[in-house]
Image (tube, helix red, strand yellow):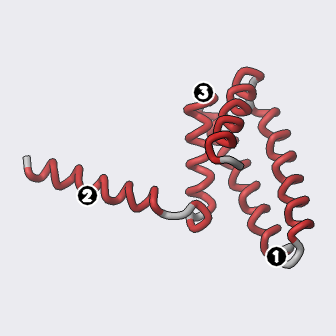
Amino acid sequence: MKTVYACVFSLALSCGALVAQPISDQPIEARATGIARQMVRTSQLNEAQYLKVRRMTIDMLTAEQEAKAMYAAEPAALAKRIGELQIAYEANLATVLNSQQLLAYKQAQTNTIAVNGR
């Protein structure tokens, strides 16, 4: 029984360490996986959609990281580029998700913005 408690405790500690890590410090693939998993929960993606969304998210996050490096001294250009990337990402999502899933994605995004204040 002590072994079970020890395993549960160590699992809780490791999960807590992952949650405590700032999002920007996580590797792109881990962030993309988290985003895609969240979309599975909110938009009911199937396996094929999950894989496509994860790949598109990796591509978008990589492009965002490159833009941040390229436009570090130009905040207006950076904001414009990130906006373009977000528009392209959402257009790509529209090719993968059905209308109900896309609506659920938009609602989840709106709820996240309302909660986080961004």
User: What residue appears at the point 84 percent right and 53 percent down from the top-left corner?
Assistant: 85
Q: Quadrant of residue 43?
A: top right
**Cα–Cα span, label 3 and label 1:** 37 Å
The residue at the point 74 percent across, 67 percent down is: 65
- Amino acid at dot 1: Ala
Residue tagged 1: 72
**What SS does tag 3 mark?**
loop
Mark positioned earlier in the residue sequence (2 or 1):
2
x%, y% of residue 40? 58, 34
In which quarter of the view is residue 96 placed? top right
* Residue labelled with disc 3: 44
Q: Which secondary structure lies at badge 2? A: helix
Local crowd at mark 3 within 10 Å, few (<14), some, or many (≥20)?
some
Q: Amino acid at mark 2?
A: Ser
Considering only vertical position in the picture, is 32 above or below 20?
above
**Residue 20: percent from left, percent from top:** 45, 61
Of labels 3 and 1, earlier in sequence is 3
In the rendered view, does 21 fall on the left or right side of 17? Answer: right
Indicate which disc residue 10 carries: 2
Q: Nearer the viewer, residue 49 or 110?
A: 110
Q: Amino acid at mark 3?
A: Gln
Camera-nearest label, 2 or 1: 1
Residue 9 drawn at (x, y percent)? 23, 54
